[in-house]
Image (spheres, rainbow, N blue to C red):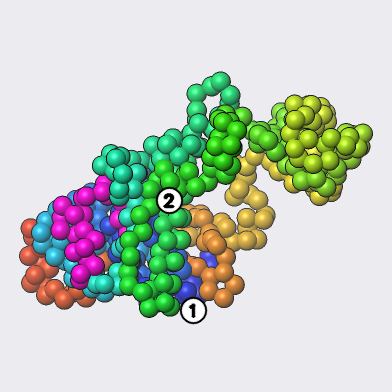
Amino acid sequence: MKPVAPTVNALEGIRILELGQLIAGPFAAKILGEFGAEVIKVESPVTGDPLRKWRMLHNENSLWWEIQSRNKKSLALDLRDPAAQDVIKRLITECDVLIENFRPGTLESWGLGWEELQSINPKLIMLRVSGYGQTGPYKDRPGFGVVGEAMGGLRHLSGEAGRPPVRVGISIGDSLTALHGVIGILIALRHRDVNGGLGQVIDAALYESVFNMMESLLPEYSVFGAVREPAGSRLPGITPSNAYRCADGKYALIAGNGDAIFRRLMNAIGRPDVAEVSDYAQNDGRAKAADYIDSVIAEWAGKNTLDDVLEALHQARVPAGRVYDIADIVADPHYQAREMIINDTLPDGSPIKVPGIVPKLSATPGGIHSKAPSLGQHSRQLLRDAGLSDEQINDLIKKGVVGTNEAKCTD
């Protein structure tokens, strides 16, 4: 089921200029576009956003691109050219937000730094995404999500004790930074529009966005000198919470770490005697006996199939689940009921399933308003709207400063 775009969009009237590429900046713009903001994506006129060629391709175009760039307009523009920089300055006069994720100093070298753009539009909000932030001794270093995940502390905790650290499997550092960027944009819009403020800069660093997720890592080190180590599927210091192998070789994830939940779990697996141990009444006591408690649960799980384990624990109201791969996700009725699997089509009419919209708002839900654009699909119209004549536009196209692909327009 494809959700119909709502008649009222929460961010309608907000205009976003996206100068970023790949993941962090564009993912932030994607979220805003799903809730009604107009997103103008600026790409290289020769190659476009490199994401167009990442992961698996269909008709020489990335399927990832189709998700990341839905609800956006493509303006193919060579930002290194002074004529293109003048176009950006024209567009900025009508924009609420600029999103960029170049290395710090890049926009300044093009005459498009914060001071220049704010002087053109004092109400402009600028999200600046980078590996290390706009200040500090590392600011000039190139930084991808992998670096942010490592410096932020996540990679050290990933994997099994005594083995090399592993990645989560997706570019989680980029996505976390994008989410922090969206939060910053919405806060800045609120300040500007409700409190009568001007625009401001949002400085979102990859490593800081990851570090912000590190829970009690810092205070535990500060007070106890404790350096948390990787623990595989176990959640250290919170017991029980682990993955347990079942009789059919599959794993059940069981989180029985609430006090009342723990008692229900022990009763469900036929071990009320463990539930009655006074030292296990609260988490701090259970954490000291994590190995023993895990062994009790593992013994029970190992005698039952995954389905039987999950059924017993669901009946006992104990949080538990299976490890989903994408095939499990697509087949799951709960995903279907919540419209998290959307049936859509690619520009050539081929069917495709795409992720639904989150978060879910009751009055102003997000939606898919348009497909991901072809490179330069909206260049001519956007430049006309910015005040350029057809003669000027044609001259920029001839010089290679602007790219256009109107023939492949799908909207």
Q: What residue type is disc 1 on? A: Thr
Q: Is residue 348 visible?
A: no
Q: Is residue 248 above or below residue 376?
A: above
| x then y, percent, for residue 136 | 31, 44
Magenta residues? Answer: 99-120
Numbered circle sitting on residue 142: none
Image spot of residue 378 (x, y percent):
26, 66
Residue type of the residue flagged with mark 2: Thr
**Quarter residue 275 falls in:** top right
Is residue 241 one of those drawn in magenta? no
Say which residue label 1 marks.
7
For mark 2, does the 10 Å Cα neighbourhood hold few (<14), some (14 to 19), or many (20 or more) residues? Answer: many
N-terminal label among 1 and 2: 1
Q: Which residue is mark 2?
A: 177
Q: Regarding mark 1 in the picture, which secondary structure is present there? A: loop
Establish if 276 lies above or below 1: above
Residue 65 in the image, given as x and y percentages of width and height: 38, 52
Displayed quadrant of residue 238: top right
